[in-house]
Amino acid sequence: MRCSLATALVLSVSFLAPQFAQAQMLTKFEKEGPCKTRITVPIEIYGDGATDDFAFEIRKNVRDQWAGPSAEDAAAIGSSLGLETDWLADEDNAEWYKKYLEKNEGAIDPEVNQDGTQELVDKAGQIRGIYADYVREFSADPACIQGECCAVRIVTDVKVRKADDDPTPGYYQIEIVDDPNFRSYVWAGHKAREGVENPDEDNPDDWQTTPGTNGGSNGKWANNSSRNAAAHEVGHLMGLMDQYKDIKNADGKTIGSFQQHGHRHDIMAQSEAFPYRDAIAQLMEIGGIECDEETCCPGFEYNRFGQNYGVTVLAVGDAIAACNKPALRRLRSQLVDQRRNLMLASRIPAHRKIPLAVAIDEKIARIDEALKKVCDRPVTGTTPPAVTIGEDYTPIPVESDTDSTTWCEYGTDSPGGGTLIPSGGAPGTTPGSTPGTTPGSTPGTTPGSTPGTTPGSTPGSTPGATPGTTPGSTPGTTPGGRPTISGGVPIGSTPKDEDDPEETTPGETDDPTDDTPEIPTTVYVKAKASVLKGANGTKTSEIGGQRIKLIPDATKNPALPTDPGAQKDQTGADDDPAQCTTDDDGECQIVIADTRTTLGLGLKWDVSARYDYEVETPQSSGATVIGDEPLSDADKDTIVDELTGNGLDEDDIEFNNYRLGDKWVTGIGYGLKYDYGDDWSLDLGLKYKIEPDLCRTIQPGPPLGSSPQNYSAIGGEIPGAVISLPGHMTQENAQ
Amino acid sequence: MGIRVFVFLLLAFSLSMVGTGRAAPPDDFTMTVVSEPVHLPEEIEKLRVDVKANGEVILHAFRDGAGVEHPRRTLRLNRAAMDAIYAEIEANKFFDLKEFYGDERVAGGDRVSILITANGRRKEVITVNIKVTDFDDIVRKLNEYLPEGRKIYYNALSKYADDYLEVKR
């Protein structure tokens, strides 16, 4: 029992009976090796329940509970089994209890108390079994529990004596009572842990127990092995405090107790539970044992594994979402390699290997499942979204680059993942009409057509060739080479200045290089996608907030100084990209002026044409949240409400927490392919950004051995799609 | 003189009523007793008994220390039993007990609470790892009327609690 410690001090004065004494700490702390500590708890049992069999039960119970997985390891394994691991989250106690009391009007609500952890209790045995398998695989010491850095072996030296025999010096004296309903206890006081200044009365981590004796006894335990009571009481004999908290009502009256938050499955809080790593650290402090972190925690090597895994796992989500079997097979192979290398790494302690191995195994299992099931299953309703770029946009030898997370595709043979579909053009034009040609003419507009094959084109012309240098400007262009359409102002051009004689004189041909900066042209972009709304069919919606960039080829693939014989054009490589961000209607405008030349825009191109680019895109079937703690229940509820409100089945929505470095990653699966934009957090008001699992270009990881300041790069901006516009529309080949 | 005799007789009668356990519980009487392990703040091993003025007793389901599940049961006490229980409450001046008794030297053990409503008053008393005679006597009296196997148990009532601190009230 641990009520107010302040009260405890008063009571310890008033109730100190003559026979009670603070006993010497009999627990022995010894260093077994540079990274391993042995803690021996000497116990002598006596009384009518003290038998050799029960002595064995004590030893077994302590070994089972204190040499298995830590709570953190259990959480990692539980997460891989699909269990919630919120119980590990260290929430604000004061705030939580305030809400608790408000909600329950001072009554203890067992449902709240349990907080949905029953399934962990049910699967505790399975978790221990899985952990034991990993321990064997990684050649860890199965008799140890892994702390944050060093391993600790906790053993009990249990002897049985007759009640009339003299106690053996150096052994805690525990009476075993022959009554299974007796609630075990030890005599113990408590004091602030060494080195803790201004201990917090409500924080058990600031205190330690000091075993005491009453009439020569250190405590009484029931001869009942079903409660894991021995493991809990041994924790006290080693100096650990209870990790539960008294609940007081508004009048300050104690009305019950339950686990300290963040310790809901702490062996020092309840029966079916696990030791926490910070408890291991406390034990070493109590015993005066120092752990050499440089020797025992080679973070360098571990970081490398973590980084490799982090990079790979993002691609796994993308590949699963895209059902890209070749990528999945490749990633699976990578993960298997990482797994093997992790197993072989000799300088990484097992407690660091195991959670990562668990995560890798879980991802491999997901890939296998995806390869077997998901990717063979036709996904209903994933109509490829139609993305229209340019009401009057002429295909040019540049790349349209977007940050969108919805315009991407794996496993396509089409350039850049996009399919160019000449479609209904602007008034007076034929879709796909060749710039500078009569509307309806088609040569050179077919996707993938080779530059230079169009009559009049100049073979070997390069992007960025100076417009207007080729003879034969098409009649109908405005002076200066600006294309027009009959009957009106080009849709895609900036209204010209009627007073500008240079722009109104037909047939005049100027040096387009000189003119280009003076003739701004506007490219209109409209982005829209077919969005699946759960089982309610599909609908088309505009995509807002998407950044569209027009990037010169030179920028995409500049010549490197070390590239021998590099003769590539680097014009514009250092220019800012021509770009715009779509509004709520999915529309934006890119004004091309100074960059027109470098973008390769010729003077003969048809700005009046409209071109649709239909891109096969995978839609998200999951998302990821990365933060300092697992996603809270409240946030989960918000997400579930949002998804179910849009037609998804709540049963299809899953959450999955695991650690990545010092971050918590919460995976969100929602079963169906579902396009939900790039950043929910803007809409849902969540603390951390939600990144849908969409296909991303696999990027190289950071240099080996480097340790990131943070993991913000994960989920950072990477172009969602790059659409290479065929280079057949140069001014030259358009002739 | 006559008045003195009358008052004396009235007092004697009243005392005899208490002494024979015939002090009837008021209509608003309710009593709840809960016993649970301190270090297992869970529902398992949490005994709870509710008693109402009409004699209805609810024995809530629980799992005992040996792992045996006990189902929820309801029984009804007769008037004499109810009177005796209420008389014990009165005799031990339950409403004058402190709200909390405990021995902080014990880590683990168990906690017991009695919550009683009577005559518009409501009070809860909690004991943790300590013998409080006037408190424990009330539970002992209630246990007299509960079936075997469903009696309320806690350490302070056990023969093994000979090292527990003991106070009268």
Image: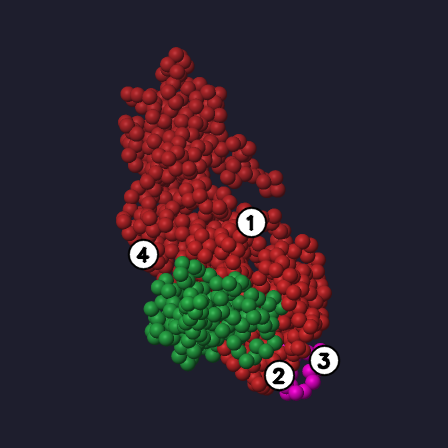
Which disc is residue A711 wearing? 1
**Marks 2 and 1, how far apart in space?**
56 Å
**Marks 1 and 3, how far apart in space?**
54 Å
Q: Is residue A582 above or below residue A36?
A: above
Which disc is residue A378 wearing? 4
Residue type, label 2: Tyr
State the image coordinates of residue A579 (x, y, percent, origin top left): 45, 33
Q: Please, what secondary structure does the residue beneath circle 2 have?
A: strand
Q: Please, what secondary structure does the residue beneath circle 4 have?
A: loop
Hue of chain A?
A: red
Crowding near pointer 3: few (<14 within 10 Å), some, many (20+)? few
Which disc is residue A46 wearing? 2
Marks 4 and 1 close (CB-CB < 8 Å): no
The nearer-to-camera label among 4 and 3 is: 3
State the image coordinates of residue B142 (x, y, percent, origin top left): 43, 74
Q: Please, what secondary structure does the residue beneath circle 1 have?
A: loop
- Point out the stretch of residues depicted in magenta: A156-171
Residue type, label 3: Pro
